[in-house]
Structure formats: C-alpha cells, structure tokens
Image (cartoon, rainbow, N blue to C red):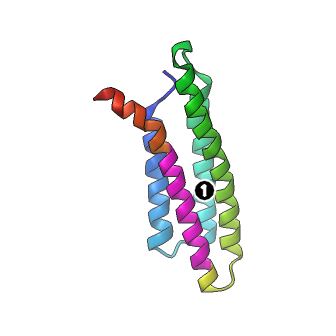
Amino acid sequence: MSLNPEKYLALVTLLEQLRSDATTTQIAAPELRRRVASLQQFFGQQIVPLADVGEPSLQGEDSRVQSYQTEMSKQLRLLEIDVMFFQGARQASTAQTRLQTISDRLTTLIQYCNAILQPEAEGEK
C-alpha cells in the first residue's frame, strides 16, 4: 500500500508544533524559515516517494492521495513565500497579520494530511 500513516502523522505533528510556536511564542524569522525548509525537506523525502509506490487495486485511492500531495506541495511553497513576507514586515501589526496567514496555511496543510488519513482510519473500524 502506498499510504504510510506514520509518515503523515509525523508530518502532522511537525505542522502542529510549528503552528503552535508561530502563534504562541515570539518566533524569529530565521528560525521560522529554517523550520519551513525542514518541513519541505521532510515532505520531499518522506511523503512524495509514497506516491511512487502503488498497487493497481488502489489506483483510485492513489489518485486521490496524489491530488492532496500536489496541493500540499503548493501550500508548502506558498508557506515559504509567507515566511519571506513575515521576515520583511517592519511593523508589529503587519508581522502579526503575516503570522496569522502562516498559521492558516499550516492549518490547511494539517487538514490535507487528515483527509489523506481519513479513509485509512475508516478502514480500521
């Protein structure tokens, strides 16, 4: 099976931790940038290869997962841009708005992971 729930759960944990740190602490832009780069690396090395391994009987499922992965890849690239905007913010109010945008994007990524994991959870019941 091409779906490896442990990898997605690990990604969700990383996303939730970053979202929490970005909204509850005064995270510095370089640290935020480093952690987003780390997220992108994890996604590229641990998640993307899962789409390459598939069984013919799971073609529909693989296509659905592939669609989510494509969206996740796009959201991660946009997250990187959001961080650059945050880094360039000169006023506290602008920085706060940028952090909220980053938090919203992380929430979207978490929702995509949960959507991928959902059929897996239903299958175990």
Q: Is residue 64 magenta?
A: no
**Pointer 1 local density, CA inside 10 Å: few below 14, some 14–19, many at least 20:** many
Where is residue 117? Give x, y as percent: 43, 37
**Rendered residue at 48%/49% (across/down):** 111
Give the residues drawn in magenta, as a range: 95-112
Tell which of 58 and 22 is nearer to you: 58
Q: Is residue 101 visible?
A: yes
**Rendered residue at 63%/62% (across/down):** 33
Residue that sits furthest to the top in the current view: 56
**Rendered residue at 45%/56% (across/down):** 16
Q: Is residue 44 above or below residue 31?
A: above
Q: What amino acid is at disc 1?
A: Val
**Rendered residue at 54%/15% (across/down):** 55
* Quadrant location of the C terminus in the rendered image: top left
Where is residue 70? Give x, y as percent: 65, 40
Q: Is residue 111 magenta?
A: yes
Q: Is residue 88 left or right of residue 13?
A: right
Q: Which residue is mark 1?
A: 36
Q: What's the magenta bit mostly, secondary-structure-wise? A: helix
Q: Secondary structure at mark 1?
A: helix
Where is residue 63? Give x, y as percent: 59, 28
Residue 45 occupies which quadrant of the picture?
A: top right
Q: Is residue 53 above or below residue 38?
A: above
Where is residue 83? Give x, y as percent: 65, 65
Q: Is residue 45 visible?
A: no
